[in-house]
Amino acid sequence: MTQQEIVDRLGISRGTLQRVLTGSALVKQSTRERVLKELERVKYVPNAIAAGLKTRRTKSIGLVGPAAIKMSNIGKVNAIHQAAREKGYSVIFGFSDGSSEEDARCIRDLRARMVDGFIALGRGLPYSNPHYQAILDAGIPLVTLYPLPELKTDCVYVDTRSAYRKLTKHLISLGHKDIALLIDHSTSQFTANRELGFRDAMRAAKIPVRDEWVVRADPVGGRGPDDEHAEKLTWNTTDYEYGFEGASTVLAKKKRPSAFVCLSDNCAVGALRAASLAGIRVPQDLAIVGFDDNEGAPYASVPLTTIHQPDEMTGRAAVELLLDRLSGRIQDKSPVVRKIATTLVIRESCGCQLRKR
């Protein structure tokens, strides 16, 4: 049923109907109730695209994300959907395999759907910058969930460099000096900042880093570190594989570390499996720590010491920042960067309990 048919049936103006649909206070309560009752009876659904053509607003947010949603992003995506819905916005998800071409296509498709603004789950890959810059050049607000090099845009992010400094410092405080880092093969800031935090802590403690123990696990094989195609393969490889392959490689060496700092909790679970197959006890012979504090961390074969990522806080803060831009509540054109703090969660895998005995 069209709006014209509804106003004819109810004997009201198009303006009154629009005020009811937009929640305006400039409508008598009795009229509002009568209109809403009729809309419910005929199961009327407003045409958001048509309304957007008139108001230049579709009350929708474009979420630019990779095709493979890893555990570390699920919480953020859920929080974004929930926060947007509470504000009367919908979220349209755009899929990309992580390549420059697919990022461009994803953004183009979302712009064709007239989204009011963008939130990007970018991992900090430099070749994505021109496509995100095109959004900003078009005057469309953009909030990223990870700092992107040389891109001046609003950002809400978890400080992974600080988190990995904290993780490594914790292991050092327990007496560990022979510490390995298990990460993926990506060249993204997502990976680079983890390694930087690890090296920060080791340098501060004056402990040399053994390069053979900084393992960029490569389960697929044959990838160059600067190859964009490698990034696509990296994203499609599970963190379980990275942990298992990386830990297996290190544990096969003559000189073994006493602790592993892992890319994620799932990576740490893979490392736990590798240690078990090698006959190495965790935490008696080897400490393992993760990152994310996902729902499986307390239920791993050895409950994981990890860093808690406040996904709900991150997703909600991103939506609030984007809507503040859209509403004009933030008028300063300078990028707003909001850093979300993390928390160290201590369980059994680091060996704290053994040292208390």
Image (spheres, grey):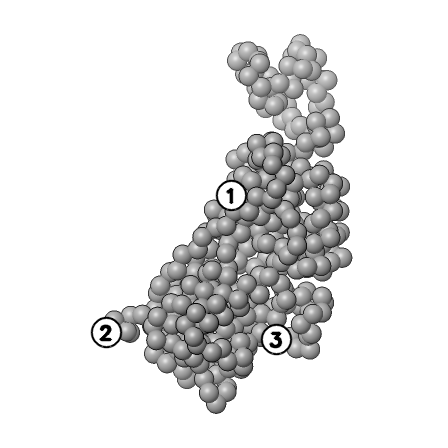
Residue 70's spot in the image, x, y percent? 56, 59
Secondary element under disc 3, as helix, strand or loop, is loop
On the image, which quarter does residue 15 sit in?
A: top right
Residue 307 falls left or right of residue 25: left
Q: Are marks 2 and 3 in contact (CB under 8 Å)?
A: no
Looking at the image, can residue 341 be seen?
yes
Q: Earlier in the sequence, mark 2 or mark 3?
A: 3
Residue under label 2, please give it. Answer: 357
Residue drawn at (68%, 74%), measured in percent from left and top? 223
Q: Give 357 or 303, whichever is nearer the viewer.
A: 357
Which kind of residue does numbered mark 2 sit on?
Arg
Looking at the image, can residue 246 be seen?
no
Residue under label 1, please give it. Answer: 316
Residue under label 3, please give it. Answer: 218
Residue drawn at (52%, 35%), measured in percent from left and top? 86
Q: Earlier in the sequence, mark 3 or mark 1?
A: 3
Secondary element under disc 1, as helix, strand or loop, is helix
Q: CA–CA distance between discs 2 and 3?
A: 39 Å
